[in-house]
Image (cartoon, grey):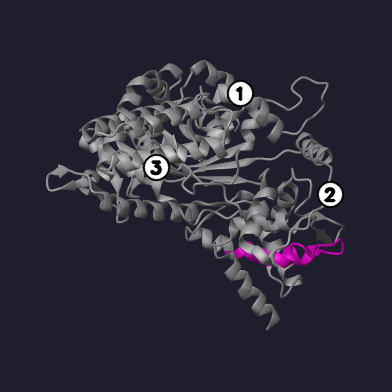
Amino acid sequence: MGDQIEHIIPDLGEWPITNFFENRSEFIEALNDYTYKKLLEKDSDLKSLLEKTIYMEKQRVANKPLKVDPSDDKVYWGKLGQKLASATMPDHQKEVVEKIVKRIINRYSEEIVSGFVPKTFKFARKFLTAVFKRLFNKIRFPWLFKAWGSKTELLDKIQVSGKLDEVRALFNKGTVVLVPNHFSNLDSILLGYAIDSKAGIPAFTWGAGLNLFDYEILARYMNRLGTYRVDRRKKNPIYLETLKSMSALSLHFGLNNIFFPGGTRSRNGEMEKNIKLGLLQSTMEAQRLNFESGNDKKIIIVPVILGYHFVLEAKSLIEQHLRQAGKEKYTRIKKRNSVVRKAWVVFKNILRKETDVRVHFCQPMDVLGNELDIEGNSITNNGKSVDLKEYFRKGDEVNKDNQREKVYTQVLANRIINTYREENVILSSHLLAFVAFKLAERKFNGLNVFEMVNRLNKSFGIEIEELHHELSTVIAQLILKEESGEFTLSETVRNGATECMASGLKKLGLFHKQRPLFRKNSKLLGSESLKLLYFYHNRLVGFGIEDFMNEYVYQEIN
Protein backbone atom coordinates (compact mmCIF):
# COMPACT_ATOMS: atom_id res chain seq x y z
CA MET A 1 0.00 0.00 0.00
CA GLY A 2 2.82 2.39 0.79
CA ASP A 3 4.62 1.74 -2.46
CA GLN A 4 5.51 4.91 -4.30
CA ILE A 5 3.46 5.20 -7.50
CA GLU A 6 5.30 5.63 -10.80
CA HIS A 7 5.71 9.29 -11.70
CA ILE A 8 3.85 10.42 -14.81
CA ILE A 9 6.95 12.53 -15.66
CA PRO A 10 9.97 10.90 -13.98
CA ASP A 11 12.52 13.50 -15.18
CA LEU A 12 12.30 16.70 -13.08
CA GLY A 13 13.87 18.59 -15.96
CA GLU A 14 10.70 17.98 -18.00
CA TRP A 15 8.24 19.08 -15.33
CA PRO A 16 5.99 22.04 -16.24
CA ILE A 17 7.16 23.94 -13.15
CA THR A 18 10.81 23.50 -14.20
CA ASN A 19 10.11 24.77 -17.71
CA PHE A 20 8.14 27.70 -16.35
CA PHE A 21 10.92 28.97 -14.09
CA GLU A 22 13.59 28.42 -16.72
CA ASN A 23 11.71 31.16 -18.60
CA ARG A 24 11.19 33.33 -15.54
CA SER A 25 12.51 36.52 -17.15
CA GLU A 26 10.17 36.12 -20.10
CA PHE A 27 7.23 35.58 -17.77
CA ILE A 28 8.04 38.63 -15.62
CA GLU A 29 8.23 40.78 -18.73
CA ALA A 30 4.82 39.51 -19.83
CA LEU A 31 3.46 39.99 -16.29
CA ASN A 32 4.64 43.60 -16.19
CA ASP A 33 2.93 44.44 -19.50
CA TYR A 34 -0.25 42.55 -18.60
CA THR A 35 -0.58 44.22 -15.19
CA TYR A 36 -0.01 47.70 -16.62
CA LYS A 37 -2.72 47.19 -19.26
CA LYS A 38 -5.17 45.95 -16.63
CA LEU A 39 -4.50 49.00 -14.45
CA LEU A 40 -5.21 51.30 -17.40
CA GLU A 41 -8.44 49.44 -18.15
CA LYS A 42 -9.67 49.84 -14.59
CA ASP A 43 -8.48 53.39 -13.89
CA SER A 44 -7.18 55.94 -16.35
CA ASP A 45 -6.08 58.21 -13.49
CA LEU A 46 -2.71 56.59 -12.87
CA LYS A 47 -1.48 59.60 -10.89
CA SER A 48 -4.05 59.13 -8.11
CA LEU A 49 -3.37 55.41 -8.14
CA LEU A 50 0.34 56.08 -7.78
CA GLU A 51 -0.07 58.63 -4.99
CA LYS A 52 -2.21 56.17 -3.02
CA THR A 53 0.33 53.38 -3.52
CA ILE A 54 3.33 55.49 -2.45
CA TYR A 55 1.49 56.74 0.65
CA MET A 56 0.41 53.21 1.69
CA GLU A 57 3.91 51.84 1.13
CA LYS A 58 5.47 54.55 3.26
CA GLN A 59 3.04 53.65 6.03
CA ARG A 60 3.91 49.95 5.70
CA VAL A 61 7.65 50.62 5.87
CA ALA A 62 7.21 52.77 8.97
CA ASN A 63 4.75 50.59 10.88
CA LYS A 64 5.08 46.97 9.69
CA PRO A 65 8.66 46.23 8.64
CA LEU A 66 10.00 42.71 8.08
CA LYS A 67 13.58 41.48 7.83
CA VAL A 68 12.86 40.18 4.35
CA ASP A 69 11.98 43.66 3.08
CA PRO A 70 14.52 45.19 0.67
CA SER A 71 17.21 47.18 2.48
CA ASP A 72 16.44 50.23 0.35
CA ASP A 73 12.67 50.13 1.04
CA LYS A 74 12.42 53.41 2.96
CA VAL A 75 14.73 55.29 0.60
CA TYR A 76 13.06 53.81 -2.50
CA TRP A 77 9.53 54.96 -1.66
CA GLY A 78 10.78 58.33 -0.42
CA LYS A 79 12.58 59.04 -3.71
CA LEU A 80 9.58 57.96 -5.77
CA GLY A 81 7.38 60.36 -3.81
CA GLN A 82 9.85 63.21 -4.41
CA LYS A 83 10.15 62.38 -8.11
CA LEU A 84 6.38 62.43 -8.53
CA ALA A 85 6.05 65.71 -6.61
CA SER A 86 8.74 67.41 -8.74
CA ALA A 87 6.95 66.61 -12.02
CA THR A 88 4.58 69.59 -12.39
CA MET A 89 4.21 70.07 -16.15
CA PRO A 90 1.25 67.97 -17.48
CA ASP A 91 3.09 66.23 -20.32
CA HIS A 92 6.18 65.57 -18.25
CA GLN A 93 4.06 64.43 -15.30
CA LYS A 94 2.23 61.87 -17.45
CA GLU A 95 5.54 60.44 -18.65
CA VAL A 96 6.96 60.31 -15.11
CA VAL A 97 3.81 58.64 -13.74
CA GLU A 98 3.91 55.93 -16.41
CA LYS A 99 7.58 55.20 -15.76
CA ILE A 100 7.15 55.05 -11.99
CA VAL A 101 4.09 52.77 -12.23
CA LYS A 102 6.01 50.39 -14.50
CA ARG A 103 8.98 50.42 -12.12
CA ILE A 104 6.75 49.55 -9.18
CA ILE A 105 5.03 46.75 -11.10
CA ASN A 106 8.42 45.24 -11.98
CA ARG A 107 9.58 45.53 -8.35
CA TYR A 108 6.47 43.66 -7.22
CA SER A 109 6.78 41.06 -9.98
CA GLU A 110 10.36 40.28 -9.01
CA GLU A 111 9.28 39.95 -5.37
CA ILE A 112 6.26 37.72 -6.03
CA VAL A 113 7.75 35.29 -8.56
CA SER A 114 10.39 33.07 -6.97
CA GLY A 115 12.14 30.12 -8.65
CA PHE A 116 12.35 26.34 -8.86
CA VAL A 117 15.58 24.36 -8.59
CA PRO A 118 15.24 20.57 -9.16
CA LYS A 119 18.28 19.88 -6.94
CA THR A 120 16.62 21.71 -4.03
CA PHE A 121 13.37 19.85 -4.64
CA LYS A 122 15.20 16.50 -4.41
CA PHE A 123 16.68 17.58 -1.09
CA ALA A 124 13.21 18.64 0.12
CA ARG A 125 11.90 15.15 -0.73
CA LYS A 126 14.41 13.57 1.65
CA PHE A 127 14.03 16.22 4.34
CA LEU A 128 10.22 16.04 4.41
CA THR A 129 10.32 12.26 4.47
CA ALA A 130 12.38 12.49 7.67
CA VAL A 131 10.03 15.13 9.17
CA PHE A 132 6.82 13.28 8.34
CA LYS A 133 8.20 9.97 9.57
CA ARG A 134 8.64 11.58 12.96
CA LEU A 135 5.19 13.13 12.82
CA PHE A 136 3.17 10.16 11.54
CA ASN A 137 5.22 7.17 12.80
CA LYS A 138 5.96 6.50 16.44
CA ILE A 139 9.49 5.90 17.63
CA ARG A 140 10.42 2.26 18.20
CA PHE A 141 13.84 1.74 19.74
CA PRO A 142 16.02 4.84 19.45
CA TRP A 143 19.22 2.84 19.35
CA LEU A 144 18.16 0.82 16.32
CA PHE A 145 18.49 1.77 12.67
CA LYS A 146 15.41 3.52 11.26
CA ALA A 147 13.89 4.32 14.64
CA TRP A 148 10.88 5.94 12.98
CA GLY A 149 10.31 3.17 10.47
CA SER A 150 10.67 3.11 6.72
CA LYS A 151 9.37 5.43 4.04
CA THR A 152 6.96 2.67 3.01
CA GLU A 153 5.41 2.78 6.49
CA LEU A 154 5.11 6.54 6.22
CA LEU A 155 3.39 6.39 2.84
CA ASP A 156 0.90 3.93 4.31
CA LYS A 157 -0.09 6.67 6.76
CA ILE A 158 -0.77 9.17 3.95
CA GLN A 159 -3.95 7.69 2.54
CA VAL A 160 -4.84 8.91 -0.94
CA SER A 161 -8.33 8.28 -2.27
CA GLY A 162 -10.78 9.52 -4.87
CA LYS A 163 -10.21 10.35 -8.53
CA LEU A 164 -6.42 10.03 -8.60
CA ASP A 165 -6.34 8.07 -11.87
CA GLU A 166 -8.45 10.74 -13.54
CA VAL A 167 -6.21 13.55 -12.25
CA ARG A 168 -3.10 11.75 -13.50
CA ALA A 169 -4.69 11.16 -16.91
CA LEU A 170 -5.76 14.80 -17.25
CA PHE A 171 -2.48 16.34 -16.06
CA ASN A 172 -0.99 16.69 -19.54
CA LYS A 173 -4.28 17.76 -21.13
CA GLY A 174 -4.48 21.13 -19.42
CA THR A 175 -3.32 23.21 -16.45
CA VAL A 176 -4.41 21.76 -13.11
CA VAL A 177 -5.57 23.83 -10.15
CA LEU A 178 -5.96 21.98 -6.86
CA VAL A 179 -8.43 23.65 -4.49
CA PRO A 180 -8.09 22.08 -1.01
CA ASN A 181 -9.86 22.89 2.22
CA HIS A 182 -7.59 24.64 4.70
CA PHE A 183 -7.13 23.71 8.36
CA SER A 184 -3.43 23.85 9.11
CA ASN A 185 -0.15 25.52 8.21
CA LEU A 186 0.91 21.99 7.34
CA ASP A 187 -1.56 21.79 4.44
CA SER A 188 0.61 23.14 1.62
CA ILE A 189 3.67 21.11 2.55
CA LEU A 190 1.75 17.91 3.20
CA LEU A 191 -0.26 18.19 -0.01
CA GLY A 192 2.89 18.93 -2.00
CA TYR A 193 4.57 15.86 -0.49
CA ALA A 194 1.54 13.65 -1.18
CA ILE A 195 1.31 14.89 -4.78
CA ASP A 196 4.90 13.90 -5.40
CA SER A 197 5.28 10.75 -3.29
CA LYS A 198 1.82 9.21 -3.35
CA ALA A 199 0.18 10.56 -6.51
CA GLY A 200 3.25 10.58 -8.77
CA ILE A 201 2.42 14.04 -10.13
CA PRO A 202 4.92 16.87 -10.73
CA ALA A 203 5.14 19.75 -8.27
CA PHE A 204 2.67 22.63 -8.12
CA THR A 205 3.20 26.23 -7.12
CA TRP A 206 1.33 27.83 -4.24
CA GLY A 207 1.29 31.16 -2.42
CA ALA A 208 3.33 31.48 0.78
CA GLY A 209 3.11 34.46 3.14
CA LEU A 210 6.12 36.76 2.86
CA ASN A 211 6.52 36.58 6.65
CA LEU A 212 7.75 32.97 6.21
CA PHE A 213 10.65 34.35 4.18
CA ASP A 214 11.74 36.41 7.20
CA TYR A 215 13.73 33.37 8.33
CA GLU A 216 16.92 33.18 6.27
CA ILE A 217 17.23 29.38 6.10
CA LEU A 218 13.55 28.88 5.31
CA ALA A 219 13.61 31.65 2.72
CA ARG A 220 16.60 30.06 0.99
CA TYR A 221 14.64 26.88 0.28
CA MET A 222 11.20 28.42 -0.26
CA ASN A 223 12.68 30.62 -2.98
CA ARG A 224 13.80 27.49 -4.85
CA LEU A 225 10.68 25.34 -4.49
CA GLY A 226 8.35 27.21 -6.82
CA THR A 227 6.24 29.03 -4.25
CA TYR A 228 5.15 32.56 -5.01
CA ARG A 229 5.36 35.19 -2.30
CA VAL A 230 2.29 36.93 -0.94
CA ASP A 231 2.71 40.04 1.21
CA ARG A 232 -0.56 40.48 3.13
CA ARG A 233 0.62 43.84 4.46
CA LYS A 234 0.42 45.36 0.99
CA LYS A 235 -3.12 46.52 0.25
CA ASN A 236 -2.32 49.12 -2.39
CA PRO A 237 -4.00 48.80 -5.83
CA ILE A 238 -0.83 48.27 -7.86
CA TYR A 239 0.38 45.37 -5.71
CA LEU A 240 -3.02 43.70 -5.62
CA GLU A 241 -3.37 43.95 -9.38
CA THR A 242 0.12 42.53 -9.89
CA LEU A 243 -0.66 39.61 -7.59
CA LYS A 244 -3.98 38.80 -9.30
CA SER A 245 -2.38 39.12 -12.73
CA MET A 246 0.41 36.75 -11.70
CA SER A 247 -2.18 34.15 -10.71
CA ALA A 248 -4.08 34.31 -14.01
CA LEU A 249 -1.08 34.68 -16.28
CA SER A 250 0.90 31.85 -14.67
CA LEU A 251 -2.04 29.51 -15.34
CA HIS A 252 -2.12 30.75 -18.92
CA PHE A 253 1.60 29.96 -19.14
CA GLY A 254 0.88 26.39 -17.95
CA LEU A 255 1.99 26.58 -14.30
CA ASN A 256 -0.08 24.18 -12.16
CA ASN A 257 -1.34 25.88 -9.00
CA ILE A 258 -2.68 25.14 -5.54
CA PHE A 259 -5.33 27.65 -4.41
CA PHE A 260 -6.90 27.66 -0.95
CA PRO A 261 -10.32 29.01 -1.92
CA GLY A 262 -11.33 29.72 1.68
CA GLY A 263 -8.46 32.21 1.79
CA THR A 264 -7.26 31.27 5.27
CA ARG A 265 -7.28 28.41 7.76
CA SER A 266 -10.63 27.49 9.27
CA ARG A 267 -10.59 29.02 12.75
CA ASN A 268 -13.47 26.98 14.13
CA GLY A 269 -12.65 23.66 12.45
CA GLU A 270 -15.62 23.69 10.05
CA MET A 271 -15.38 22.81 6.38
CA GLU A 272 -15.44 25.87 4.13
CA LYS A 273 -18.92 27.26 3.53
CA ASN A 274 -17.81 30.39 1.73
CA ILE A 275 -15.16 30.89 -0.92
CA LYS A 276 -13.22 34.04 -1.72
CA LEU A 277 -13.88 34.78 -5.36
CA GLY A 278 -10.88 37.00 -6.18
CA LEU A 279 -8.27 34.28 -6.55
CA LEU A 280 -10.77 31.83 -8.04
CA GLN A 281 -11.72 34.33 -10.71
CA SER A 282 -8.17 34.16 -12.05
CA THR A 283 -8.95 30.62 -13.28
CA MET A 284 -11.74 32.09 -15.39
CA GLU A 285 -9.43 34.79 -16.70
CA ALA A 286 -6.76 32.24 -17.57
CA GLN A 287 -9.25 30.06 -19.45
CA ARG A 288 -10.37 33.04 -21.51
CA LEU A 289 -6.74 33.98 -22.22
CA ASN A 290 -6.13 30.44 -23.47
CA PHE A 291 -9.08 30.64 -25.84
CA GLU A 292 -8.12 34.15 -27.01
CA SER A 293 -4.64 32.94 -27.92
CA GLY A 294 -5.94 29.91 -29.84
CA ASN A 295 -4.97 27.49 -27.08
CA ASP A 296 -7.87 25.15 -26.31
CA LYS A 297 -6.24 23.61 -23.23
CA LYS A 298 -8.49 23.73 -20.22
CA ILE A 299 -7.93 25.00 -16.73
CA ILE A 300 -8.75 21.85 -14.75
CA ILE A 301 -10.20 22.37 -11.28
CA VAL A 302 -9.71 19.56 -8.75
CA PRO A 303 -11.18 20.04 -5.25
CA VAL A 304 -9.09 18.24 -2.63
CA ILE A 305 -10.30 17.27 0.84
CA LEU A 306 -7.65 16.99 3.57
CA GLY A 307 -8.67 14.95 6.60
CA TYR A 308 -6.59 15.14 9.79
CA HIS A 309 -7.20 13.40 13.09
CA PHE A 310 -5.25 16.28 14.60
CA VAL A 311 -4.45 19.91 13.80
CA LEU A 312 -1.31 21.04 15.60
CA GLU A 313 -2.51 24.63 15.93
CA ALA A 314 -6.12 23.71 16.83
CA LYS A 315 -5.94 25.30 20.29
CA SER A 316 -4.90 28.73 19.03
CA LEU A 317 -7.37 28.58 16.12
CA ILE A 318 -10.39 27.77 18.29
CA GLU A 319 -9.36 30.45 20.80
CA GLN A 320 -9.35 33.01 17.98
CA HIS A 321 -12.79 31.85 16.86
CA LEU A 322 -14.32 31.91 20.35
CA ARG A 323 -12.97 35.40 21.08
CA GLN A 324 -14.18 36.76 17.75
CA ALA A 325 -17.59 35.03 17.68
CA GLY A 326 -18.34 35.21 21.41
CA LYS A 327 -17.10 38.74 22.14
CA GLU A 328 -18.46 39.69 25.57
CA LYS A 329 -20.08 36.25 25.99
CA TYR A 330 -16.70 34.52 26.03
CA THR A 331 -14.11 34.95 28.75
CA ARG A 332 -10.82 33.21 28.28
CA ILE A 333 -9.57 31.47 31.40
CA LYS A 334 -5.79 31.44 31.33
CA LYS A 335 -3.86 28.68 33.01
CA ARG A 336 -0.25 29.11 33.99
CA ASN A 337 1.69 26.39 32.26
CA SER A 338 5.40 26.23 31.60
CA VAL A 339 6.17 26.77 27.92
CA VAL A 340 8.95 24.21 28.22
CA ARG A 341 6.57 21.68 29.80
CA LYS A 342 3.93 22.21 27.10
CA ALA A 343 6.54 21.82 24.36
CA TRP A 344 7.87 18.65 26.02
CA VAL A 345 4.40 17.07 26.23
CA VAL A 346 3.79 17.73 22.52
CA PHE A 347 7.25 16.43 21.61
CA LYS A 348 6.76 13.33 23.77
CA ASN A 349 3.42 12.64 22.08
CA ILE A 350 5.02 12.95 18.67
CA LEU A 351 7.69 10.43 19.72
CA ARG A 352 5.29 7.89 21.17
CA LYS A 353 2.22 8.11 18.99
CA GLU A 354 1.39 7.63 15.34
CA THR A 355 -1.41 8.86 13.12
CA ASP A 356 -2.51 9.09 9.52
CA VAL A 357 -4.00 11.64 7.17
CA ARG A 358 -6.45 11.39 4.28
CA VAL A 359 -5.91 13.20 0.96
CA HIS A 360 -9.02 12.82 -1.19
CA PHE A 361 -8.97 13.96 -4.84
CA CYS A 362 -12.48 14.91 -5.97
CA GLN A 363 -13.98 14.76 -9.45
CA PRO A 364 -12.03 17.03 -11.87
CA MET A 365 -14.11 19.79 -13.44
CA ASP A 366 -13.78 22.68 -15.86
CA VAL A 367 -14.02 26.33 -14.77
CA LEU A 368 -17.81 26.22 -14.99
CA GLY A 369 -18.05 23.20 -12.70
CA ASN A 370 -18.81 20.69 -15.47
CA GLU A 371 -17.30 17.26 -14.88
CA LEU A 372 -14.38 16.27 -17.11
CA ASP A 373 -14.07 12.80 -18.56
CA ILE A 374 -10.75 11.00 -18.94
CA GLU A 375 -10.13 12.77 -22.27
CA GLY A 376 -10.84 16.22 -20.87
CA ASN A 377 -14.29 16.64 -22.42
CA SER A 378 -16.75 18.78 -20.45
CA ILE A 379 -19.86 16.84 -19.44
CA THR A 380 -23.02 18.48 -18.07
CA ASN A 381 -25.24 17.04 -15.33
CA ASN A 382 -27.46 15.39 -17.94
CA GLY A 383 -24.47 13.61 -19.49
CA LYS A 384 -24.11 15.77 -22.59
CA SER A 385 -20.77 16.97 -23.91
CA VAL A 386 -20.41 20.76 -24.24
CA ASP A 387 -17.95 23.11 -25.94
CA LEU A 388 -16.55 25.24 -23.12
CA LYS A 389 -15.34 27.89 -25.56
CA GLU A 390 -18.94 28.77 -26.41
CA TYR A 391 -19.35 30.21 -22.91
CA PHE A 392 -16.57 32.75 -23.56
CA ARG A 393 -17.80 33.95 -26.94
CA LYS A 394 -19.88 36.87 -28.08
CA GLY A 395 -20.91 36.03 -31.59
CA ASP A 396 -18.05 34.24 -33.28
CA GLU A 397 -15.25 35.78 -31.20
CA VAL A 398 -13.92 35.03 -27.74
CA ASN A 399 -14.28 38.26 -25.78
CA LYS A 400 -13.65 39.70 -22.35
CA ASP A 401 -16.73 40.27 -20.19
CA ASN A 402 -15.95 40.93 -16.53
CA GLN A 403 -19.55 40.66 -15.36
CA ARG A 404 -19.99 37.33 -17.15
CA GLU A 405 -16.80 35.96 -15.60
CA LYS A 406 -17.92 37.04 -12.11
CA VAL A 407 -21.15 35.07 -12.56
CA TYR A 408 -19.18 32.05 -13.81
CA THR A 409 -16.86 32.31 -10.80
CA GLN A 410 -19.79 32.20 -8.40
CA VAL A 411 -21.12 29.11 -10.22
CA LEU A 412 -17.71 27.44 -9.83
CA ALA A 413 -17.49 28.43 -6.14
CA ASN A 414 -20.88 26.87 -5.43
CA ARG A 415 -19.84 23.70 -7.23
CA ILE A 416 -16.64 23.43 -5.16
CA ILE A 417 -18.54 23.91 -1.89
CA ASN A 418 -21.06 21.23 -2.90
CA THR A 419 -18.20 18.89 -3.81
CA TYR A 420 -16.57 19.39 -0.41
CA ARG A 421 -19.82 18.22 1.16
CA GLU A 422 -20.58 15.37 -1.27
CA GLU A 423 -17.09 13.86 -1.26
CA ASN A 424 -16.08 14.58 2.32
CA VAL A 425 -14.69 11.46 4.01
CA ILE A 426 -16.06 11.14 7.56
CA LEU A 427 -13.25 9.94 9.84
CA SER A 428 -13.71 8.09 13.13
CA SER A 429 -12.17 10.90 15.19
CA HIS A 430 -14.45 13.56 13.71
CA LEU A 431 -17.60 11.50 14.23
CA LEU A 432 -16.64 10.54 17.78
CA ALA A 433 -15.92 14.21 18.61
CA PHE A 434 -19.23 15.28 17.09
CA VAL A 435 -21.38 12.81 19.01
CA ALA A 436 -19.42 13.26 22.26
CA PHE A 437 -19.77 17.05 22.13
CA LYS A 438 -23.51 16.76 21.53
CA LEU A 439 -23.77 14.57 24.61
CA ALA A 440 -21.72 17.14 26.54
CA GLU A 441 -24.16 19.85 25.44
CA ARG A 442 -26.99 17.86 27.03
CA LYS A 443 -25.12 17.83 30.33
CA PHE A 444 -24.67 21.62 30.17
CA ASN A 445 -28.30 22.13 29.21
CA GLY A 446 -29.15 25.82 28.74
CA LEU A 447 -25.58 27.08 28.40
CA ASN A 448 -24.25 28.46 25.13
CA VAL A 449 -20.95 27.12 23.84
CA PHE A 450 -19.02 30.19 25.07
CA GLU A 451 -20.08 29.51 28.66
CA MET A 452 -19.91 25.75 28.33
CA VAL A 453 -16.25 25.42 27.32
CA ASN A 454 -15.14 27.16 30.52
CA ARG A 455 -17.32 25.07 32.86
CA LEU A 456 -15.25 21.91 32.51
CA ASN A 457 -14.14 20.24 35.76
CA LYS A 458 -12.75 16.90 36.89
CA SER A 459 -16.21 15.52 37.60
CA PHE A 460 -17.30 15.87 33.97
CA GLY A 461 -17.91 12.55 32.26
CA ILE A 462 -19.73 10.99 29.31
CA GLU A 463 -21.15 7.50 29.78
CA ILE A 464 -19.45 5.08 27.39
CA GLU A 465 -22.58 3.00 27.01
CA GLU A 466 -24.66 6.04 26.07
CA LEU A 467 -22.01 7.23 23.61
CA HIS A 468 -21.80 3.79 22.00
CA HIS A 469 -25.58 3.68 21.64
CA GLU A 470 -25.65 7.14 20.02
CA LEU A 471 -22.78 6.24 17.69
CA SER A 472 -24.55 3.05 16.60
CA THR A 473 -27.73 4.96 15.79
CA VAL A 474 -25.87 7.73 13.95
CA ILE A 475 -23.71 5.34 11.91
CA ALA A 476 -26.78 3.38 10.79
CA GLN A 477 -28.28 6.63 9.49
CA LEU A 478 -25.02 7.73 7.87
CA ILE A 479 -24.72 4.46 5.95
CA LEU A 480 -28.15 5.10 4.45
CA LYS A 481 -27.12 8.62 3.47
CA GLU A 482 -23.83 7.36 2.02
CA GLU A 483 -25.79 5.07 -0.29
CA SER A 484 -27.59 8.12 -1.65
CA GLY A 485 -24.24 9.76 -2.44
CA GLU A 486 -24.38 12.55 0.15
CA PHE A 487 -20.86 11.87 1.49
CA THR A 488 -18.34 9.09 2.11
CA LEU A 489 -17.60 7.14 5.29
CA SER A 490 -14.16 5.86 6.16
CA GLU A 491 -13.93 2.09 6.51
CA THR A 492 -13.48 2.42 10.26
CA VAL A 493 -16.77 4.30 10.62
CA ARG A 494 -18.56 1.90 8.29
CA ASN A 495 -17.42 -1.02 10.44
CA GLY A 496 -19.58 0.15 13.32
CA ALA A 497 -19.62 1.97 16.65
CA THR A 498 -17.17 -0.26 18.52
CA GLU A 499 -14.36 0.13 15.98
CA CYS A 500 -15.20 3.80 15.39
CA MET A 501 -14.96 4.58 19.12
CA ALA A 502 -11.71 2.67 19.58
CA SER A 503 -10.07 4.33 16.57
CA GLY A 504 -11.45 7.77 17.38
CA LEU A 505 -10.22 7.68 20.98
CA LYS A 506 -6.77 6.64 19.84
CA LYS A 507 -6.41 9.28 17.13
CA LEU A 508 -8.48 12.31 18.16
CA GLY A 509 -6.16 15.29 18.66
CA LEU A 510 -3.49 12.90 19.89
CA PHE A 511 -0.58 15.38 19.86
CA HIS A 512 -2.24 17.96 22.11
CA LYS A 513 -1.16 18.46 25.70
CA GLN A 514 -4.82 18.54 26.74
CA ARG A 515 -6.77 15.55 25.45
CA PRO A 516 -10.12 16.36 23.85
CA LEU A 517 -11.45 12.95 24.93
CA PHE A 518 -10.01 10.14 27.01
CA ARG A 519 -11.12 7.05 28.91
CA LYS A 520 -11.46 7.84 32.65
CA ASN A 521 -12.51 4.34 33.66
CA SER A 522 -14.48 1.40 32.30
CA LYS A 523 -17.72 3.38 32.29
CA LEU A 524 -16.81 7.01 31.64
CA LEU A 525 -14.99 9.21 29.13
CA GLY A 526 -13.57 12.54 30.20
CA SER A 527 -12.22 15.64 28.47
CA GLU A 528 -9.33 17.91 29.37
CA SER A 529 -10.44 20.53 26.83
CA LEU A 530 -13.99 21.04 25.60
CA LYS A 531 -12.59 23.76 23.32
CA LEU A 532 -10.58 21.17 21.40
CA LEU A 533 -13.49 18.73 21.42
CA TYR A 534 -15.67 21.52 20.02
CA PHE A 535 -13.07 22.26 17.32
CA TYR A 536 -12.96 18.67 16.06
CA HIS A 537 -16.75 18.35 16.42
CA ASN A 538 -17.17 21.31 14.08
CA ARG A 539 -15.70 19.39 11.14
CA LEU A 540 -19.07 17.65 10.71
CA VAL A 541 -21.30 20.65 11.34
CA GLY A 542 -23.57 21.23 8.35
CA PHE A 543 -23.74 17.64 7.20
CA GLY A 544 -27.17 17.02 8.66
CA ILE A 545 -25.95 14.84 11.53
CA GLU A 546 -27.00 17.40 14.12
CA ASP A 547 -30.54 17.44 12.72
CA PHE A 548 -30.75 13.69 13.05
CA MET A 549 -29.41 13.74 16.60
CA ASN A 550 -31.81 16.48 17.66
CA GLU A 551 -34.66 14.41 16.29
CA TYR A 552 -33.30 11.39 18.15
CA VAL A 553 -33.12 13.30 21.45
CA TYR A 554 -36.72 14.46 20.98
CA GLN A 555 -37.87 10.89 20.43
CA GLU A 556 -36.04 9.72 23.57
CA ILE A 557 -37.56 12.42 25.77
CA ASN A 558 -41.07 12.02 24.40
Q: Of discs 3 and 1, which sits in the foreground?
A: 3
Find the distance from the CA under tag 3 to the CA under tag 2: 46 Å
Find the distance from the CA under tag 2 to the CA under tag 1: 33 Å
Q: Amino acid at mark 1?
A: Glu
**In the picture shown, does residue 546 fall above or below 534?**
below
Q: Amino acid at mark 2?
A: Arg
Magenta segment, principal secondary structure? helix
Q: Which residue is mark 1?
A: 216
96 or 354: nearer the viewer: 96
Which comes sooner in the sequence, label 2 or label 1? 1
Residue range (magenta): 449-477
Q: Which structural element holds mark 2?
A: loop
Badge 2 density bin: few <14, some 14–19, many ≥20, Cα 10 Å: few
| Residue drawn 51% across the image and 53% down it | 272
- Residue 458 visible in rendering: yes
**Is 315 positioned to the left or the right of 36 in the image?**
right
